[in-house]
């Protein structure tokens, strides 16, 4: 079974530029998550999708970050304009999203490492 | 709201020695608890999870964790460290309502030959 795919793996940009990250979840997974992991910290949830609808985006800085999940499969996270403090690893994760019972395992991609200069 | 605290940002052990990583949680409802491992330049991989069944949970790679409600703890152990255990370990908690995970700051494990 293929895992969660992300691209690019690394990105270096200057502040005030824009950048986009792409995520392809595990096939059949309805729930998709974007996390921000700043060096020395644990991952912080930015946004959670159930199919193509947003479940939670309370931690997403909406003045500069946006995300979409068209057709309930792939997702794109965008930052515009980037700030120095956006330097981090951006992780995408997915889970089955059946919501039948309990908490599902989230499967993580390798992440995109962003450096803003 | 739930949260976790991982005691010790760095742990160094000798190969063959016990690995003990500490995690304390805070949750207003019975929690679901997880341990993830992250190898350099890779995503997070699930080691084990507690979902209110047995309090002693066995995971992959010889790791296990014990849920202690009275101590609000979920410490991770491995009896004998291997060089391949060098990585960063994250404890996470969820209240199960919306599947959101709250992660601790992580503990980096180094293994000495």
Image: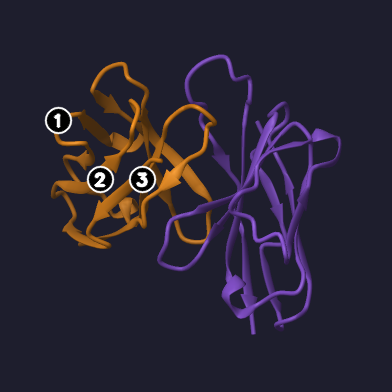
Work out how far the residue at label 3 is from the one at label 1, CA to CA, in angstroms: 16 Å
- Sequence-wise first label, 2 or 1: 2
Q: Chain of mark 3?
A: B
Chain B pictured colour: orange
Q: Is residue A77 left or right of residue B107?
A: right
Q: Quadrant of the C terminus of chain A?
A: bottom right
Q: Nearer the viewer, residue B40 or B72?
A: B72
Q: Is residue B101 left or right of residue A65?
A: left
Disc 3: which residue: B3
Circle 1 crowding by C-alpha within 10 Å: few under 14, some 14–19, many from 20: few
Q: Nearer the viewer, residue B53 or A107?
A: B53
Chain A pictured colour: purple
Disc 1: which residue: B70
Q: Position of residue B36 (x, y in %)?
A: 41, 43
Work out how far the residue at label 2 is from the one at label 3, CA to CA, in angstroms: 10 Å
The number of callouts visible is 3
Q: Chain of mark 2?
A: B
Disc 2: which residue: B23
Q: Chain of mark 1?
A: B
């Amino acid at each position: 079974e293929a895992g969660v795919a992300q691209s690019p793996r690394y990105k270096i940009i200057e502040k005030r530029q824009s950048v986009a990250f792409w995520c392809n979840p595990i096939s059949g997974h309805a729930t998709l998550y974007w996390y921000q992991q700043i060096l020395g910290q644990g991952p912080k949830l930015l946004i959670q999708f159930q199919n193509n609808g947003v479940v939670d985006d309370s931690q997403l800085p909406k003045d500069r970050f946006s995300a979409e999940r068209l057709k309930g499969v792939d997702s794109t996270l965008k930052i515009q304009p980037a700030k120095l403090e956006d330097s981090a690893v951006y992780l995408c994760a997915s889970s089955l999203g059946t919501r039948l019972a309990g908490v599902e395992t989230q499967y993580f991609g390798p992440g995109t490492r962003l450096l803003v200069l | 709201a739930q949260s976790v605290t991982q005691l010790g940002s760095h742990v160094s052990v000798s190969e063959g020695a016990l690995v003990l990583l500490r995690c304390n949680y805070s949750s207003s409802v019975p929690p679901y608890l997880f341990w993830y491992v992250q190898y350099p330049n890779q995503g997070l991989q699930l080691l084990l999870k507690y979902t209110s069944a047995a309090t002693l949970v066995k995971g992959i790679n010889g790791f296990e964790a014990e849920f202690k409600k009275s101590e609000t703890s979920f410490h991770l152990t491995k009896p004998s460290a291997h060089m391949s255990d060098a990585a960063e370990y994250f404890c996470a908690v969820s209240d199960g309502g919306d599947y959101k995970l709250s992660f601790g700051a992580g503990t980096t494990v180094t293994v000495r030959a």
